[in-house]
Image: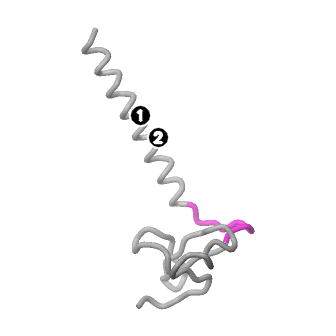
């Protein structure tokens, strides 16, 4: 009985981890910008954001949030 409960617990933990990974992947693969969002450059770690035609990385954020972030810009900035 104890062995079955342990197996069930491992299965539930694996399911939770898989769902969390799927949600994270879905959140990072969105490429469209809604009218209430803007591209924010300069606040994303290399390889973590989306890339525009000029090769600059950005993240989509609600309008006005980018200006409040240190290093955030709604215009493309060259890497320093």
Q: Is residue 28 magenta?
A: no
- Residue 70 image offset from top left, x and y in percent: 52, 79
Q: Secondary structure at mark 2?
A: helix
Residue lying farthest to the right in this orientation: 35
Q: Quadrant of residue 33?
A: bottom right
The relative height of residue 10 versus residue 29 in the rendered view (above or below) is above
Q: Is residue 47 left or right of residue 70?
A: left
At a point 68% along the width and 74% down the height, the residue shown is 64
The answer to which image quadrant residue 1 occupies is top left
- Please tell me which residue is depicted at 69% across the width and 71% down the height of the picture: 63
Q: Is residue 41 above or below residue 28?
A: below
The residue beneath circle 1 is: 15
Q: Residue furthest top?
A: 1
Tell me if mark 2 has few (under 14), some (14-19) or many (20+) residues whose alpha carbon lies within 10 angstroms of its own: few
**Disc 2 to disc 1: CB gap under 8 Å:** yes
Q: Residue at x 51, y 48 (%)?
A: 23
Residue 28 x, y percent position in the rendering = 51, 60
Give the side of residue 42 with respect to residue 8, left or right: right
Dot 1 falls on a residue whose secondary structure is helix
- Residue 41 lies, in percent from the top left, at 54, 80
Residue 73 vertical position relative to residue 37 in the rendered view, above or below: below
Q: Residues within 10 Å of mark 1 (few under 14, many from 20)?
A: few
Magenta segment = 30-37
- Give me the disc on residue 19: 2
The image shows residue 78, relative to residue 37, as above or below, that is below
Q: Residue at x 57, y 61 (%)?
A: 30
Question: In front: 55, or 5?
Answer: 5
């Amino acid at each position: 009985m104890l062995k079955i409960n342990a197996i069930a617990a491992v299965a539930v933990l694996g399911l939770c981890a898989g769902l969390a990974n799927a949600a994270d992947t879905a959140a990072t693969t969105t490429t469209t910008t809604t009218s209430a969002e803007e591209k924010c450059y300069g606040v994303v770690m290399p390889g973590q954001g989306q890339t525009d035609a000029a090769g600059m990385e950005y993240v989509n954020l609600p309008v006005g949030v980018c200006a409040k972030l240190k290093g955030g810009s709604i215009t493309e900035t060259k890497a320093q």
